[in-house]
Image (tube, helix red, strand yellow):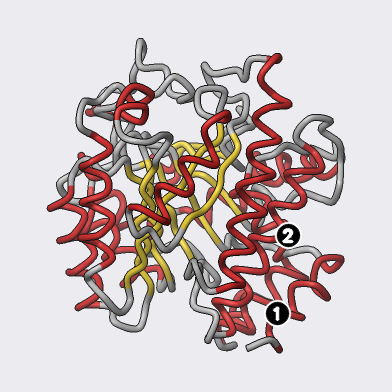
Amino acid sequence: MTRGGLGRLGLTARLAVNAQVTRRHPVSLVHFVTRRCNARCSFCFIDFDNPAPRSQEMTLDEIERMTRTLGPTLANVNLTGGEPFLRGDLVDIARLYYTNAGVRSVYVTSNGTYTERAESFAGVLAREFSDRMTIVSLSVDGIAGEHDRIRRVEGLFERVMETYHAVDSVGAGVMANVAVTVSHENHATIPALYESLVGDHGVRSVTAIIVRDEGVYEVPEEARAGVLDSYRWLTSRIVADQRAGRLRGYDPTTVQGRLMNRKNEMLYDIIDDIYLEPHFVSPCRAGALFGVVDVDGVVYPCEVLDMPLGNLRDHDMDFSALWADQPATDARRWILDSECHCSYECAWGFNILGNARYQPRLLSAVFKG
């Protein structure tokens, strides 16, 4: 099917054709808007001893030009960092993705320091794009002082709880979430942390991430089994509490919400299976349905592979031109031929959506109200 043919279809049909057949355009992107951060987590993959200078960050004008070239099927973007709210123009960046690229959801990952900025961000986008979904996901690693110790920011736990409730109170079109990264630092305290978040602090949306080797961080070998055990406990509890109504998750009254909740359940099962003994399960669609835009305009198939597809600045900020260029084509072929595999959740989410073997279980969620 030609690109023009894709453009004439509705978004849902375009996504289905692209995800299952053509795989020519990204469905989701992670965009590192900054590498600046006020926290110093021990498991972070960013090398803060050699940080990317602020001068390398893509300007708003560059992002404006890029967002006009992202193709017909981009449904979601994850704005991340560093700490994305350190960019004063973050709401303008999100607005460009909504307006120029037509994304249906913007997902922001934050450490929760900047309550007023996060609340304003969510409120502005909810008013301007009432038919879209803005998700602010806040990282929590421990209870109170333990979280502050891991993140190395005094008083951060109280601040992130304030931010969660401020964003959650915005209302329709906004979702506040707490993301728990299970690591060597906190795996022994995960049950207590979860019960504190849900029982004591009124958190109603929780997602789980398992720490992985990346950048300057490597999981201590002796901690891997314990990390997986705690991740397994946490994901099982999240799924059970969503089904029981204790957690909200994505809106189960909508088809999209049920699909996303089921996709997360399937993702948790896959990560559980491959974490300790990595092995190939199904073809990875990184570089096809999913990609990463780094702070300086370099595009990668994912966060794990140090395999740059090119720099947007060398392509006049034309993302589609870069995505169709030879380095990107070669990278996609290498990923498939090498049976590349890892435990990177963001890519796995779109591997599930873009692989026929997962569709029966995924689509069964459509018919369950």
Q: Position of residue 314 (x, y in %)?
A: 43, 39
Residue 77 located left or right of residue 218? left
Residue 75 visible, this angle = no
Residue 95 located left or right of residue 190? left
Q: Which of 13/227 is in front?
A: 227
Estimate how packed mark 2 is, as few (under 14), some (14 to 19) or many (20 or more) residues with alpha carbons within 10 Å.
some
Q: Position of residue 5 (x, y in %)?
A: 63, 83
At 58% from the left and 60% from the top, the residue drawn is 26
Give the Cα distance between marks 1 and 2. 12 Å
In terms of secondary structure, where does tag 2 sit? helix
- Name the kind of residue labelled 1 in the image: Ala
At 15% from the left and 46% from the top, the residue drawn is 88
Q: Which mark is residue 266?
A: 2
Q: Which of 9/248 is in front?
A: 248
Q: Position of residue 32 (x, y in %)?
A: 39, 41
Estimate how packed mark 1 is, as few (under 14), some (14 to 19) or many (20 or more) residues with alpha carbons within 10 Å.
some
Q: Is residue 133 above or below residue 326?
A: below
- Name the kind of residue labelled 2 in the image: Met
Quadrant into which the C terminus falls? bottom right
At 59% from the left and 41% from the top, the residue drawn is 302
At 71% from the left and 89% from the top, the residue drawn is 367
Q: Is residue 146 above or below residue 58?
A: above
Q: Which residue is mark 1?
A: 365
Which quadrant would residue 6 be assigned to in this image?
bottom right
Q: Is residue 126 above or below residue 340?
A: below
